[in-house]
Amino acid sequence: MIADKSLPVNMLQRFGGVDGDYSELTRALLKQQKTVWEQLATGYKSLDDIQVREFQFDGFTMKAQFNPGRIISSSANVDEKSIKERKCFLCLENLPADQKGIQYGSDYLILCNPFPIFPGHFTIPHVRHIPQRIDESFDILLELSKDLGKYYTVFYNGPKCGASAPDHLHFQAGNKGFMLIEEQFDTLKTAFGEVIHNYNELQITAIDDTLRRFISVESQDKARIEDMFEMFYTAFTAQNGNDEEPMMNIISFFIPGYDMWRVLFIPRGKHRPSYFFLEGDDKILLSPASVDFGGVLITPVEKDFNRLTKEHITQMFSEVSLAKPVFQNIISQLKKGLEKS
């Protein structure tokens, strides 16, 4: 928590009495920032007026949240030209004067997100401006989810899967239990899951709930999860035939009572559904990322929120989820790799 020479001291905030407990530190940071940072206070005040609708599917529930404060993130242009023409809002020199953070290790900073979805929403950027890539930073995702696991879930949006800053490596964190998939996981696993590995304190399950396709990994052993991620990343990358990061979202839950991780790997086929790009009344501004795959759909436009149907949701996931044959190919490759390990 002590500032090192690479970080400006005025960007860091320390709190007495809970040194080393990042869950408590992060909670305290939010409380402090609400009192001194007007933009953040306004963002959280807007959560008082959000509206929610529920949609029942076979065996699980989805929610839609009308959250106008998310319009900037949901509609962000993330093409190469647009990225080059704007200042990076996660770089230290571009942060608002009132924004403070908590240093995490030597390379990351925990910041309050001024455009919240969760009652407590945080962005965790690298202190250097490096591209959004998970292959060399997955271990940090696991460490973060453990260190914040008392109160928060940590997630990663790939550069073409919901990250509004694809040019700057970062993670996000939000309140545990907010994403419906956390409570519904056991039901989804039982009803729609295929256990593809359950040995040596590592359980891997492929889940296809008719809307989403993802792989869950459960273990107390961090190294085993990292090994599995390497296999998944290699198998998924091979489907692409290039060196780009394959499209994915990752949600990492740490369960303190069992001292274990539950990590969801969500391979993607597309960034946004086709109706996102339509004109006029046919357009629906819905740009799914980890939270949406977690069961809470973020709609920043009220008319879209009001007219959203189960059919729209089904269409979205059918378009942006990885195609079933490709998903099955990845599962086959994982099975072969696990047999050899």
Image (spheres, grey):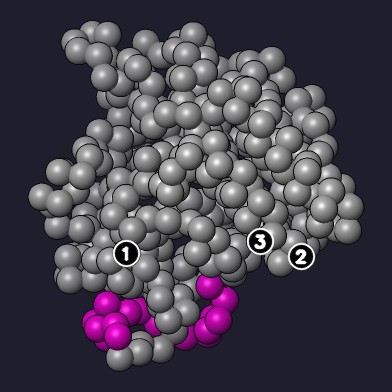
| Residue where numbered disc 2 is placed | 221
Q: Position of residue 330 (x, y in %)?
A: 65, 36
Q: Secondary structure at mark 3?
A: helix
Above/below status of 78 relative to 59: below
**Amino acid type of the residue tagged 3 in the rendering:** Glu
312 lies left or right of 302: right
Q: Which stretch did the figure color magenta? A: 6-23
Marks 2 & 3, CB-CB < 8 Å contact: no
Q: CA distance from mark 2 to mark 1?
A: 29 Å
Q: Position of residue 49 (x, y in %)?
A: 34, 34
Mark 2 or mark 1, which has the lower sequence index? 1
Q: Secondary structure at mark 1?
A: loop
| Residue where numbered disc 3 is placed | 226
Residue 22 is a magenta residue: yes
Mark nearer the viewer, 2 or 3: 3
Viewer can see residue 165: yes
Q: CA distance from mark 3 to mark 1?
A: 22 Å
Mark 2 or mark 3, which has the lower sequence index? 2
Main SS, magenta residues: loop
